[in-house]
Amino acid sequence: MEIIIQPTLEQATGLTARLFSNFMREKPDAVLGLATGGTMEALYGALVATNLDWSRITTFNLDEYIGISPQHPQSYHSFMWKNLFNHVNVPVKNVHIPDGLAKSIPAECETYERKIFAAGGIDLQLLGIGTDGHIGFNEPTSSLASRTRIKTLTPQTRKDNARFFGSEELVPHHAITMGIGTILESRYCVLLAFGARKAKAVAEAVEGPITSMNPASALQLHPKVTVILDEAAAVGLTNKDYYHWVYDQNPDRHEY
Ligand code: PGA
């Protein structure tokens, strides 16, 4: 696992945007796994500003709430179109987000998995992390082999996301999410975490044991992961100096 710690959120976001842009220039027909949440807003803003060519890019989002329409201002459909897709030239047919209003959720999940497979799998999967260690909406105790399916959100996640909905009661209880097994099949994972409230989950995920109690810790099983943090999110890491040293010795990374 590569750990990159930047002094500020802005620098960490800028570095991620450069990493992403370089990846897309090298593979203009890449299949990207995308994420939502407050952490991603600035990143998508920075990506839009780079004027990249998205005409051959295919995207798969990690998750969507169940029971709210795509037009709902807090749906992940709305989030993605507002923050990214409306501003880049990605073909609509190449954009995939789970349908939270599907008549049969299990059938929707199966179809989603099949579409990822048919697209050749995900080249780069972007991930945030919940304060409870979730990736996508894989909450603690999610099977580390799980596939796209319905998950019940924890009270902690609903509390964390109440800020978007205005009140906790309005946050849906369920979501469709790619599974941890699905995420681990992507060729490269980039996890972003900013702010002190993520420090505990990050420390457990990076340096703790692999456990379904912190789903992000499953990334320790993946051969290619970059974790990008600001200093605040990194405060719980025991080997912080080592990660800084490794980064400082690797000038190739500095171009990012
Ligand atoms: P946040 O969410 O970026 O809004 O903190 C991250 C997540 O829950 O994955």
Image (spheres, rainbow, N blue to C red):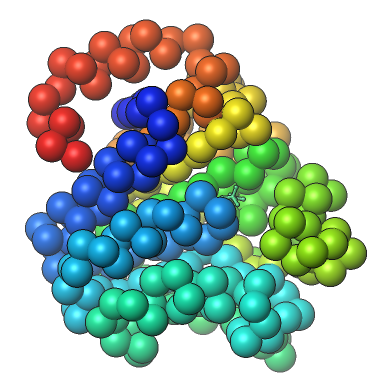
Q: Is residue 84 left or right of residue 198?
A: left
User: What residue sits 73% from the left and 49% below the top?
Assistant: 160
Residue drawn at the location 38% of the way across and 41% of the way down: 10
Q: Nearer the viewer, residue 25 or 223?
A: 25
Question: Relative to the observer, which residue lies in front, 10 or 115?
Answer: 10
Where residue 3 appears, x then y in whole percent?
Answer: 36, 27
Up/down of 230 relative to 18, above or below:
above
Give the side of residue 15 with respect to residue 170, left or right: left
Which of the pair 113/44 is nearer the observer?
44
Residue 165 higher or lower than 81, as above or below: above
- Residue 153 sits in quarter: bottom right
Quadrant (top left/top right/bottom left/bottom right) for the N terminus:
top left
Q: Decide if residue 154 is in sight here.
A: no
Q: Is residue 32 above or below residue 134?
A: below
Residue occupying image coordinates x 79% and y 45%: 156
- How many marks can you see? 0
Q: Position of residue 125 (x, y in %)?
A: 38, 55
Image quadrant occupied by the C terminus: top left
Q: Which residue is the extreme one toward the right?
A: 169
Residue 35, horizontal then vertical, whole percent: 48, 59
Q: Is residue 82 left or right of residue 12?
A: right
Res. 139 in view: yes
Tell me the quarter of the picture where residue 134 sits: top right
- 52 left or right of 186 in image: left
**Where on the picture, by quarter, is residue 203?**
top right
Q: Position of residue 14 (x, y in %)?
A: 30, 45
Q: For the point 36% across and 88% down, which residue is it?
A: 92
